[in-house]
Image (tube, rainbow, N blue to C red):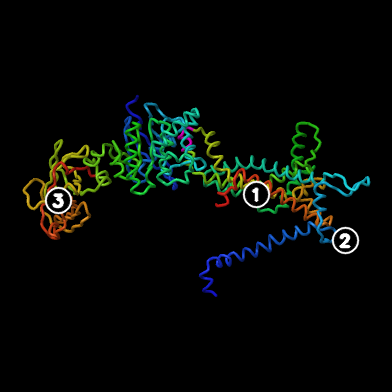
Amino acid sequence: MLKRLRENKSAQGTLLALPTTIWMFILLILPLLLTLVISFGKRSPDGEVIFTFSLDNYIRLMGISSNCQNGQSWCFDSLYLQILVRSLMLAFNTTVIVITMAYPLAYFIARADPKRRNTFLFMVLIPLWTNFVIRVYAWMMLLRKEGAINLIIGTVAHWLGINFVPLELLYTPGAVLVGMVYEFLPFMILPIFTSLEKIETSLYEAAADLGASPFKTFLRVTLPLSMPGVVAGTILVFIPVMGTFIVSDILGGRQYILVGNLIQRQFLDARDPAFGSAASLILMVMTLVVTYFYTRKFGFGEEIVAA
Amino acid sequence: MNEFAVELRDVVKKFITPEGNELNAVDHVDMQIRNGEFFSMLGSSGCGKTTSLRMIAGFEWPTEGEVYIEGKLMGHTPPFQRKVNTVFQSYALFQHMSVYQNVAFGLEMEGAHRDEIKKRVMRALEMVQLTGMENRRPKQLSGGQQQRVALARALVKTPDVLLLDEPLGALDLKLRKEMQLELKALQQQLGITFIYVTHDQEEALTMSDRIAVMSRGKVMQMGTPVEIYERPRNRFVAEFIGESNFLEGQIKSLSANEASVFIPALNAEVTGTPASEGLVNGEQVFVSIRPEKIHLTEHSERLNTFEGEIASTVYIGSNTHVVVHIGDVRLKVWEQNRISRLEPSSFYTNGQKVDLMLMPENTLVLKKD
């Protein structure tokens, strides 16, 4: 038996892949299948799942409501579509802002004296030592009506003798955006830094030698060679922003709902796992579609993955 | 046109070592490189050759002294405003661009017209025999081909001076020899000044019109390959280029082209040629003679002839390397195998007495320091 295995290369391969396959099945494929099955089910009056095959949940998500006021059998309700579009827009805006903030920072760190470089990287990583939720609460403290930001502006206004009404910063879409940008900035800085750091100095010298000004060198050499980092960072930021519910929950208030919040509430508040599962799958499909087109245009950031 | 393509006047480059000490990587160097010349800077690593080249390219600025290109003072002129181009040791090709785009890059920076760029890029690629490779990525090419792309990318700009920083260092021996001849031919055909940095003495001798031998930031000697090999001016050059035998002694009599040196180890005087500058009578000196320039004879009464004993004989194909003892002195002698060595009797036997003759014009008197 053992001898035969030793000779059979393909059997060896199968055997070696077995542990991974088992874990992948238990941790990824099985839950996904469960979600899929549940998403076709219905909510029983006491909040249990009735397993059937019904597309009702998906139809509801697409804006066709059966819960109409004037006795019609169906009507259009854009609530869920609005939530999906809002999540998509927020993820897009967050990613764009994070790129514009992270790139100069990563560039600065990559070009810094190697002795100081680690200190800078350390500073980027320090916030990650604190729990995600606590960091979001910290922003709540800053943005509140009695928070630090209003306090500072108020004090300055007082000195200048200007009448100051505290700004409504918390529970606004802006607060959610700020929170998201803050939370995900390090995940963009690090991959961009890695790809910038790998560019050999001789390439900058070669560009200068061939007549390129520093600005042209940046456009033609630095930027294209650091694109794998930007792509990897975008994937690391865009996907979680699409699904996170904590930031919007704490900084956006009850009215500001993203897909993440919708899913969370279906499972915990509304006790409708079937509808929540359907929303989860829609979120996954949306993320996949965006990532697919994005990576097809810009590649997969292979070099970062390889590094 | 200026007589000198590049001139370094009393150039010093100081670096701070990781230990915090100040180091003169380039130490008061003067160099005049003529237009159309193939000029090599030769030395082992850390001798300042690459730093000198980088100061000409503009990647480094001298701490003291001045660099002139075509008679113009460079000062702090950035690299992209100098009419010199560099072939880097690591090639420094842009991996995200095709071969064509790499070569076109420099012309695009000049703002040349598309058609003009195409014409010149294709001509440059033809020159380095890479026609048909335009669309490849650098990673898809062999080391030798990448080297040619780097060369084409620099030459397409038609620089006044081409700087080459050990461009053949990464190639295998056979390819290196081929490329040496090709580079030399290319330089003669284009008439561009080449400044070539290498640690390989054979490479420098093969290709250069003139060589600057460098050590510890200083130029030890500058001259044609023949001058450098036949008339080294100090012990460093005599030792670094080829091999030499050294004998310690004291000058007994001195004229412009002849010096007599007493060698205590031989208990005899040797007549040689003063090769270092500023030798004085009575000075302690080295007498240097190359192994292939010593004649072994059966018996001779001629000048500078000493009796010795064969200590070892090694056959290496084209030559036979012999070690001869004269008392405590050990001399390397290389004999060319002009005669057939098939018969064992054609070799010297150990212990055999021979006469060694040192020709005065090949026996160089060098300063001790």
Q: How many marks?
A: 3
Q: Which residues are magenta?
A: A206-211
- Please identify the residue farthest to the top as the structure is shown: B1
According to the picture, the residue beneath numbered tag 2 turns out to be A46
**Classed neighbour count for the residue bearing mark 1: other residues with Cα under 10 Å, few (<14), some (14–19), many (≥20):** some
**Classed neighbour count for the residue bearing mark 3: other residues with Cα under 10 Å, few (<14), some (14–19), many (≥20):** few
User: Which quadrant of the view contains residue B187?
Assistant: top left
Calculate the distance from the C-alpha at mark 3 to the C-alpha at mark 1: 79 Å
According to the picture, the residue beneath numbered tag 3 turns out to be B264
According to the picture, the residue beneath numbered tag 1 turns out to be A236
Q: Amino acid at mark 2?
A: Asp
Q: Are marks 1 and 2 in contact (CB under 8 Å)?
A: no
| Chain hosting mark 1 | A
Residue A144, percent from left and from top: 78, 44
Instruction: Say if labels 3 and 1 share a chain.
Output: no
Residue A123, percent from left and from top: 61, 48
Q: Are marks 2 and 3 in contact (CB under 8 Å)?
A: no
